[in-house]
Image (cartoon, rainbow, N blue to C red):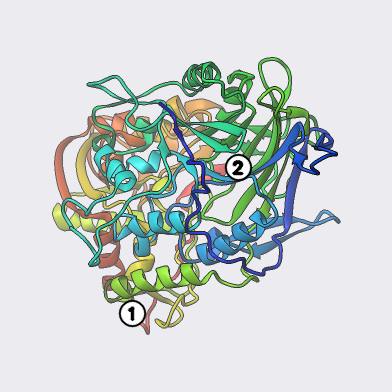
Amino acid sequence: MPATTPPHDRRRRRTTRLLAATAGLATVGALVAALPSTASADETTGKHWPGRYQDVQLLSFNDLHGNLEPPSGSSGRVTELQPDGTTKTIDAGGVEYLATHLRKAREGHKYSVTAAGGDMVGASPLLSGLFHDEPTIEALNELDLDVTSVGNHEFDEGAQELARLQKGGCHPTDGCYTDEEFEGADFPYLAANVLDDKSGKPILKPYWVWKKKDVKIGFIGVTLEGTPDVVSAEGVKGLTFKDEVETINKYAKVLQRQGVKSIVALIHEGGFPAGTAYNYDCDAPGAGDGISGPIVDIAKNVTPQVDALVTGHTHAPYVCTIDDPAGNPRMVTSAASFGRLYTDTTLTYDRWTGDIARTAVGSANHVVTRDVPKAPDMTALIGKWNTLAAPIGNRAIGYISGDIGNTGTESPLGDLIADAQLAHGKELDPETDLALMNPGGIRAPLTYAAKGAEGDGVVTYAEGFTVQPFANTVNLQDITGTQLIQILKEQVSGANAAAPKILQISSGLTYTLDLTKTGADRVVTDSVKLNGAAIDPSATYRVASNSFLAGGGDGFPTLGQGTNDLVGADDLTALENYLTANSSATSPIAPPKADRITIVK
C-alpha cells in the first residue's frame, strides 16, 4: 500500500517564519500561463468552494552529499549568466541558508511539497561522514523534506545501512554518538528499481502519495540502472538494479489504478546542459535541444502519465522541457549539487480530472545565496556535531602554497593523490611502478584560504576527509603492459565512451590523449611511457589504485583482472602520510602542474 501523508500537516517541525531576501531567479521554464481559477461561493452562506484548478508548489533539490556547512572553492559557487552575456560567480550553499530559502519560498503556499532526487548522503564532508551521515538525515528532517529517491551514493555502505538511515537505530559498529538513539528519516526513501535478489521486491517503498485535502500527487523514485558500475561491489551485493523507464512506467500504472493521476518521477540520473550557468536557457534553441545525456532518452520514453521529472546525479543545473512519448512537452529539472540551488515548480492540479494541467507547469532554479539570515536550528545542529568532530577534524595534516583544484581532464589534485598512492604503494612494495586514481573519487578541491582557525595554507584532516570520504583501501596489483594500455583505452571506450573518465596518474607516467579521434583511438598507444620508456606489452607492472578501481569499478573491467593483490591502508591515510612527509609550514606543497597527459583538441 502507498504511504500517504496524514490528514494533519506532517510538518510538525515547522519553525516560525523567517524574514529573508528572496533567492535569485534562475532558469524559468513554463509551458503556458497558469489556468484561471474557478473558485465559487454559495450566495446564501458565503462559503467558498475550491476552484477547479489548484496550484501545488513543488520544491526540489538533489545531490546534497552531506554538505551541511557551506562548501568551499568551486564546490560552493554557481555561475550566473548576465543580461549582457557575461557571467559572474555567486557563493552558494550551506543548510543554514538552504533552510531559510526553503522556508521563505513556502510562505503563502498552502499546497507545498518538498522532494529530492537522491544522493542526499554519501561522499560527505567529515562533519556528516564521520557519523555515517546521521547529521544529514537530522538536517533533512528539519528541512521538512517530504520524499526522496535513492541515489547511487546511498549504497556506499550497503543496503542494511541505508535501511538504518530510513528506520533509525544506532550504528552496528560505532554505536550511538549521543545520549539519544538515532531516529532515522521522517521522509520515505523510494527505491522502485532496486530489488532484493532473494525476494525479488524493492528494498524500500517504490512510490509514495502526497495528499492535502482533495489534492493528491504520486511520487515514484528510482536511481540509475548503472549503480553497480559506480559503487563498491560490497555496497550492492545481493541487489539488482532494473531499467529506470520500465520501472517508472510500471508503477505509474499502479498509481493510476489507485486513482492517483498526478505523478512526479524522482530519478537519480541526469543530463548535461550546453551551458554551465545555472540560468542557462536550455529551451532557447528548441525544446530539449540544449541538453544531452542519459536523461534525454529516459524523458522521451517515460509514460505521458508522469507529469514532471526531478533528476540529479550529474551535478548540473537545468530546467528544460523534453517531449514525452505522446509529443507533449514535459518539465525536467535538476538543482546542481551540494545545496547550492533549489527548484521551485508550480504544478497546476485539475480537481475535475485529478491530473496535472501540464500546459500550466512552470519551473525555476533559485540560488541558495548566503546573504540571508542563517536558520537558528541548523546552526545549532551543525554546532552539536562540530563539537563531536572537532578533535578529529581540526588536526593539521599538511600545508599547501595555493589552491589545488580537482577540475579539468587532468587536475592538480588528481596528480597529488596519485603521487600519494604511489608513495604508499612503494612503502608496501618497493617494486610499485605507478598509481591510477578515478576522478569521481576526488570530491572537493584543497583550498588555500582557511575554513576555520587553522590558518591559510593549512590542510586539516576534515578537509582531507572531504576530498576522499569513501574509506577505500590502496590496493596493489600486477598488471601487464598490454592490460595497462587497455585500461587507459577504457577511459574513453566501452562503458565510458559517452562520458569519458580520465584517470589521474602518478608522476612518471605520460601519454597523449587525442580528442580529435573517437573511442579507444583517442589514447595514442605509442605515446604511453613510464619514466620516459615505452610500455612493454609483455612486461608486468605493479599498479596502485583504490579498492573501488581495483575491483573494476567506474567502467574499468581490466583493472579487475589484476593479480598478486596486496591491500594497504585507506586512501585518506595515504594522502595524510604524503602531505605530512612532504610539506611543512615553511615549505608547503605547490599545486602540481597537471602536465602528465598531453591533450590534443
Q: Is residue 458 left or right of residue 25?
A: left
Q: In the picture, residue 529 is in which quadrant?
A: top left
Front-most of 573 and 237?
A: 237
* Figure quadrant of the N terminus: top left
Nearest to the observer: residue 253 or residue 124: 253
Q: Which residue extends farthest front?
A: 44
> What SS does tag 1 mark?
loop
Can you say which quadrant of the picture contains the C terminus? top right
Query: Circle 2 is placed at which residue position?
Result: 334
Residue 547 to residue 424: above or below: above
Q: Is residue 585 above or below residue 492?
A: below
User: Tag 2 or tag 1, which sits nearer the N-term?
Assistant: 2
The amino acid type, in three-letter code, at marker 2 is: Ser
Q: Position of residue 405 (x, y in %)?
A: 50, 60
Give left or right: position of 358 versus 591. Answer: right
**Drawn side of residue 237 relative to residue 77, left or right:** left
Q: Which mark is residue 10?
A: none
Which one is closest to the eye, mark 1 or mark 2? 2
| Point 48% across, 24% down: residue | 244
- At x 74% / y 28%, what residue is drawn? 357
Q: Which mark is residue 584?
A: 1
Residue 119 % position (x, y): 44, 45
Q: Residue 76: x and y, percent?
A: 55, 62
> Disc 1 residue type?
Ser
Report the front residue among 484 and 248: 248
- Judging from the image, what secondary structure is the residue with disc 2 in? strand
Q: Quadrant of residue 170?
A: bottom left
- The residue depicted at 79 percent of the width and 42 percent of the height is 45
